[in-house]
Every structure is written in structure tokens, then in C-alpha cells.
Image: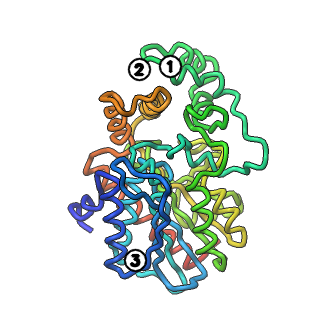
Amino acid sequence: MNSVEILNLFSESYIESRNKFLSAAKKRHLAIDHYISPFKGINQEELAIDVVYEGEVNASKLLIILSGVHGVEGFTGSAIQTGLLSSTLNLPHDIAILYIHAVNPYGFSHLRRVNEDNVDLNRNFINFAENLPENKEYSKIHNALLPPIYPFEQDEQLNHYQVIHGEKSLQYAITLGQHHFPDGMYFGGFSPTWSNTTIRHILKKYTPNVPLIASIDIHTGLGPYGLGEKIFASFDSNVFKKAQNWWGEITSVHTGSSTSIPMTGPIQIALTEECAHAEHIGICLEYGTYPLDKMINTLRADHWAYRYKQFDTVQGNEIRKNLKDTFYPDDPEWKNQIWKQAHKATLQALSGLKNNDA
């Protein structure tokens, strides 16, 4: 695929992204499942999680490729999925791919990272029958993160916290996930979201007889610009070595080698719970955009607009555009780099599934 073809995979709106993805599937005559959201897009368009299955029916090995868990990050994941559908992958015998497009279509369309209820989906896949996780450190800085006045001029409390506890501890406090401030950052929700229950339904439908599952969950934001960090995304530490054999250098949030940190309720919990019969080897493919402080401050502005009901203003529209630009750089070189890395990671996963080497 040449540079022009690669750039044509990318879009400027949820509608355009969805249409390209569906068109690529239809050209291959692949069946599509539509899970229609009860919510509407920014232009009142239909929203959905769209699912495409490619490969032999009842294949015993399955690669699941996820996009848009974090709404606005879906531009990148969607382009990659569309590109893979448009490529000749030559799937090995007994291996299939399940494309799950736009896990959070509301955030994708409305240019937010969170969903219709301000919920970060990667903090929502917890057991709500138990006591909600408590992030005491976040509660100390919630109001400092989202003060009434924007632009943020003074961050004395946050700076003091960082001096006392360190930069990594501040990142933990902000991004670990919290379940007590619904107008706050990295809110995990009070109950399972529509996306949560829908994803679980999809997994139950497509994976009941699959003993070996690989997954690639596509994200943007953290890390060096244009680099796709491969973050171990399985809860079975016994398959870490296998993941290394498949993909090469793998980082882990649990050992501190990743730019990311552990989180309260990632989507991989659903993969573990709904596919308990299967061995799961997964990664998050995290493409770096801009430095962490820029990313956090952009998210703070987004949540400020939500908390103080400022989205329908000139300032709110600027904040929305800035969020998109931060997580989805309008840079041809960046787009070419991320496509090539994703294509390679997909081929590595297929090879790993085929050989299932330890």
C-alpha cells in the first residue's frame, strides 16, 4: 500500500470513518453486524458498534482487533481496521479476524475520549456487584484539576502534589480511574455502560468455541511521537513470554516498563471473563502523539467544558478541536508510520496464532 492509499484510509469525522470501514467490508463481501447505540452523534447521525468477521467459519484461532474504546482515538483505529480489510492478509487455515469498530461511537462522533455519560470505558469493566474502587488520591485533586476558570492559569496544588509525590504518582492519581466524581476525569461509572454490555454480547456470540484468542486494542496519546508501543494486555502472566515471541519488545503496566499505568477496569477484563475458556494473548497498541502534560491539560479542558456545560460555545468548540488534534495528529508522516506498524503487528499476531509457539 503506497503513501496516498494509506492516507486515504484516514477520515475527519465518525461518519466518514464508519462509511470507509463498512465499504471495505462490503467490497470483500463480508458479513457485518450492527449494534445500534441508543444515543445520537454530534450531527444526530446513527451511532453503532459495527462488527466484521473475516475468515473460516468456526475457526479455532481468532484475532480480535478493537478500535475506539476511547472515542476520539477511534480515528486511528478505524483507519487501521479499514486498511487491513483492504489488504491481502492471506489468512492461514483455521484462523479468523474479528473487527470490532468504534467501541465508543459517542465519543468518536462528539470528539471526546469518554462516552455519553462521561465514562472512560477502560475504567468501566469492573464487578459492580462489589464495592466501587476508591481512588483517594484523585479526590484530593479533583477540584484543582477542574477549577471554574479556563484557561487554567495557576496549578499550585497540582504542582505541589507533584513536588511532594513525584510525576508518576500524579499520573497515577489522575488516570488510575475513579468512581465517585461523575463530572470528573477518568470516571469509571456507577454501572456497566451500553458499550460494556454490548461488547460482552459480541464476545459471547463470536468466541464460545474458540480456544485461542489474540487481541490488538488500538489507542493513541502516550509515548514518543509516532511510535506504537506494544503493551501487554492479558491477565495471564504465563503468556507474557509468548507475547514477546510474537511481537518482539513488549512493555507492561505491572512492571513499570510502560508509559501507561494500571487502570481500574480495562476492556480486557471482558475478554478474560467472557472468553474464560480460551487462552488470550493480547496487546494494546499505543501510538504516541504529544507529551503527557499536553495530553493531560487537553483532557482537563475537555472535562472542564463538560463540568461547566460549555461545549455549545466558541470556546467549547475550540476545546473539542484541540482534543481531536492532540489524539489524532493531522500529519501524513505520523499516519504512514502508524499504519505500517499496525500492519506488521497484525501479521505477527497471525503468525503467532498459526504457530502458537511458546
| Whether residue 349 is visible | yes
Q: Helix, strand, or loop for circle 1?
A: loop
Q: Amino acid at mark 2?
A: Tyr
Residue at 38% of width from left, 43% of height from top? Answer: 225
Numbered mark located on residue 89 in the image: 3
Which badge, 3 or 2, is on the more N-terminal residue? 3
Image quadrant in which the N terminus is located: bottom left
Residue 110 in picture, x, y percent from top left: 39, 45
The local crowd at label 2, few if under 14, some if 14 to 19, many if 20 or more residues have their Cα within 10 Å, is few
- Which tag is nearer the camera, tag 3 or tag 2? 2
Q: Amino acid at mark 1?
A: Pro
| Whether residue 233 is visible | no
Residue at 37% of width from left, 82% of height from top? Answer: 29
Residue at which label 1 appears: 147
Residue 236 in picture, x, y percent from top left: 70, 60
In the image, residue 48 sits, relative to residue 143, either above or below, namely: below
Residue at which label 2 appears: 150
Contact check, label 1 and label 2, Cβ < 8 Å:
yes
**Colour scheme shown:** rainbow
